[in-house]
Image (spheres, grey):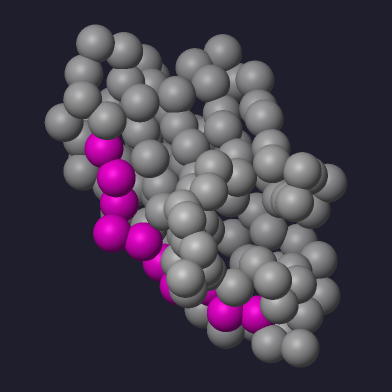
Amino acid sequence: QVQLVESGGGLVQAGGSLRLSCAASGSIVSASMNWYRQAPGMQRELIATIRRSGITNYADSVKGRFTISRDNAKNTVYLQMNSLKPEDTAVYYCNALPLGAAPSWGQGTQVTVSS
């Protein structure tokens, strides 16, 4: 089971940008990678997926503003977040779904967007 470590969170003004990184301790070539977020008092929600093939999917709430990408050579997944809104404030989690292996979660990184 790979270990995942997120980074890149922080405080940003509305309209700003952040790039989150998720570094894996091992290969992610065989894994579908996801970004989730959880706001206070809310359920964790899936916001972006990048499959092994590179195909991406986004939640409607972030479509057109967020971009997920992967660098298999670096065992890293990214989430570029543009045009941030206060409602994007949440803890962001990286998730790996490797073929034939147990899923992994990172510890999360806080993103706070001020109005």
- Whether 112 is among the magenta residues is yes
Left or right: residue 101 versus residue 62 is left
Q: Quadrant of the C terminus?
A: bottom right
User: How far across and how far down the image is residue 46, in percent?
Assistant: 54, 43
Which residue is drawn at the image coordinates 16% and 31% (left, top)?
A: 1
Q: In terms of secondary structure, what is the magenta stretch mainly?
A: strand
| Front-most of residues 26 and 104 | 104
User: How far across and how far down the image is residue 108, in percent?
Assistant: 36, 61
- Whether 14 is among the magenta residues is no
Which residue is drawn at the image coordinates 52% and 78% (left, top)?
A: 10
Query: In the displayed structure, would residue 69 be above or below residue 52?
Result: below
| Front-most of residues 54 and 85 | 85
- Give the quadrant of residue 91: bottom left
User: How far across and how far down the image is residue 17, in percent?
Assistant: 71, 69
Left or right: residue 74 versus residue 49 is left
Left or right: residue 112 versus residue 110 is right
Magenta residues, as a range? 104-113
Query: In the displayed structure, would residue 29 be above or below residue 76?
Result: above
Which residue is drawn at the image coordinates 59% and 73% (left, top)?
A: 89
Query: In the displayed structure, would residue 102 be above or below residue 106?
Result: above
Q: Is residue 21 visible?
A: no
Q: Is residue 23 visible?
A: yes
